Image (cartoon, rainbow, N blue to C red):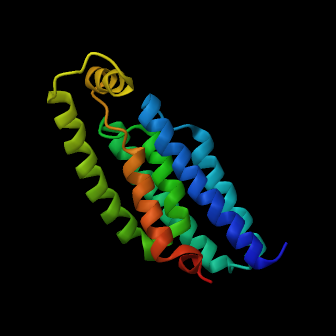
Amino acid sequence: MGRRMVGFASSAVFLLALSDAAVSDVRSFRIPNRASVTLLAAFVVFALASGVGMDVALRHGAACVLVFIAGAALFALGIWGGGDVKLLAAASLWTGFAGLPRLLAVMSVAGGLLAVSVLLLRRLPAANEGWLTLWQRRVTASGHVPYGVAIAAGGLDWWLKAGLRGVGL
């Protein structure tokens, strides 16, 4: 499989894993480990197959570790869920330090919009039936914001802006 094919396949896996996380978080307020593990594995495959230098891979790994440590602190404070921490760390493996500010900025804006939307949804009277009413009741009862959506938005934005060029190619 050539570099271009590996790049294409890796991009597809990156986008599918983020989509899986976002959809799962909306449905169940949980981000499955498979999304984060898939992002990690796809990066390793991409790095090995495309010839990304060890120095680049280590810098991206360092970004991942630092984001995970910061996220673990937010988890310990009860601010973030564990799935959010793992997903953002795995996405930051792809962006590295160079793409991390943009990922975090877009994620923050999307997360703010998402939080405001959830707060407004909680204040609206529930309709009598339909999937939105069921979700509205669940989001009101849980007190959660499906932040995987915001992380996926940040990842998608990074991919559209930098894509595979962002990992050193």
Q: Quadrant of the N terminus?
A: bottom right
**Hey, which residue is sitting farthest right in the picture?**
1
Q: Residue at x 34, y 28 (%)?
A: 132
Depth check, front residue: 91 or 131: 131
Q: Residue at x 63, y 65 (%)?
A: 11
Q: Residue at x 26, y 58 (%)?
A: 109
Q: Where does the image place residue 53, in percent across and percent down from the top left?
A: 68, 80
Q: How many marks?
A: 0
Q: Is residue 19 above or below residue 75?
A: below
Q: Is residue 8 above or below residue 77?
A: below
Q: Quadrant of the C terminus?
A: bottom right
Q: Is residue 102 above or below residue 107?
A: below
* Location of residue 106 by image quarter: bottom left
**Hey, which residue is sitting farthest bottom in the picture?**
169
**Hey, which residue is sitting farthest top in the picture?**
128
Direction from residue 132 to residue 41 in the image, left or right: right
Q: Where does the image place residue 150, in percent across and percent down from the top left?
A: 37, 51
Q: Is residue 138 above or below residue 31?
A: above
* Location of residue 9 by image quarter: bottom right
* Location of residue 27 by image quarter: top left
Q: Residue at x 59, y 50 (%)?
A: 17
Q: Where does the image place residue 39, in percent across and percent down from the top left?
A: 61, 55
